[in-house]
Image (cartoon, grey):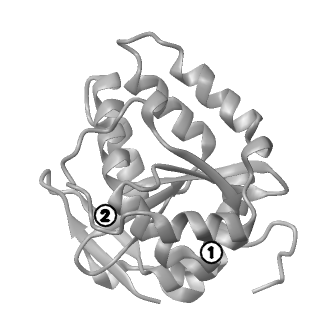
Amino acid sequence: MAQFNHQLPDGTTLQAVDVETARRYLRRVVWSIMEGTPTELIIGTAERAQAVVLSPDAWLHDVELHDQQADSGAKDRARRRLDEVEQEWQSEEHFTSLLVGMVKQRADPDRLTPPFQKQRVDAVDVQIAARLLDDVVTCLESGGLEVLMLGERGVAEAVMIPIDYWLDYLGLEADETGDDRIAGIVRERIANGDPSKWVSEEEFRAQIKDPRKPRDD
């Protein structure tokens, strides 16, 4: 299991796992989110963080903050997309063909997060996303994918977005409280500047268990 620390300009350290580790545990992360565990999974390389998996509720809250001034009902539309996502669920063949045709060049990391109405939204089974995770993460970083809903049987159970969008949302959460309390809480769960305190693979596996198969590793 490879882990990477990334320093943000404000001194915060984000801890990311490599694609192969994320591939192995993506389904368990989604299950943990379903069970109410407040967790995010950051995926990246030694050079940079690239994408994050978070709960639908956390994503909805961030969409609302992003759209607060415009008052255009983006949160309600986002919620409807989650509720009606089965209509857009993609087969592995179709999703693979979409990824092949997308731009793979990294987008400007300082690009502005577009309003939800302009974001591309796709949906696919978490097992399919795990198998194609290399291309999924690349396409999120390039802007080809912007919101990827993950789950099973047409039910959205988690959301994956570009890391740059998420960091933008964290800034909005800090503004919401007038300080860095919320952003600090979120980042503290995933940040550790001391490699000696990194969790081991065994600890990582213990934290992200399949609640329906507690003995399954």
Residue positioned 43% across, 58% down in the render: 189
| In-image side of 40 versus 56 (left or right) | left
Q: Which mark is residue 76?
A: none
Asked whether residue 136 is in view, the answer is: no
Labels 1 and 2: the sequence-earlier one: 2
Of residue 29 and residue 76, the one placed in the foreground of this image is 76
Q: Which mark is residue 14?
A: 2
| In-image side of 5 versus 83 (left or right) | left
Q: Indicate the position of residue 204 as horizontal and vertical percent values.
A: 56, 78
The three-letter amino acid code for the residue at tag 2 is Leu
Q: Indicate the position of residue 61 as horizontal and vertical percent values.
A: 51, 30
The residues bearing labels 1 and 2 have C-alpha atoms spaced at a distance of 22 Å
Residue positioned 81% across, 84% down in the render: 216
Q: Compared with residue 191, is residue 158 higher up or lower down, i.e. above or below?
A: above
Label 2 sits on a secondary structure element that is: strand
Q: Compared with residue 101, is residue 184 higher up or lower down, i.e. above or below?
A: above
Of residue 194 and residue 137, the one placed in the foreground of this image is 137
Residue pointed to by mark 1: 130
Q: Compared with residue 169, is residue 211 higher up or lower down, i.e. above or below?
A: below
Q: Residues within 10 Å of mark 2 (few under 14, many from 20)?
A: many
Residue positioned 62% across, 20% down in the render: 76
Label 1 sits on a secondary structure element that is: helix
Q: Compared with residue 4, is residue 78 higher up or lower down, i.e. above or below?
A: above
| In-image side of 194 versus 27 (left or right) | left
The three-letter amino acid code for the residue at tag 1 is Ala
Asked whether residue 162 is in view, the answer is: yes
Q: Quadrant of the C terminus?
A: bottom right
The answer to whether marks 1 and 2 mark residues whose Cβ atoms lie closer than 8 Å is no
Q: Indicate the position of residue 27 as horizontal and vertical percent values.
A: 69, 70
Q: Indicate the position of residue 183 as horizontal and vertical percent values.
A: 34, 42
Residue positioned 20% across, 54% down in the render: 108
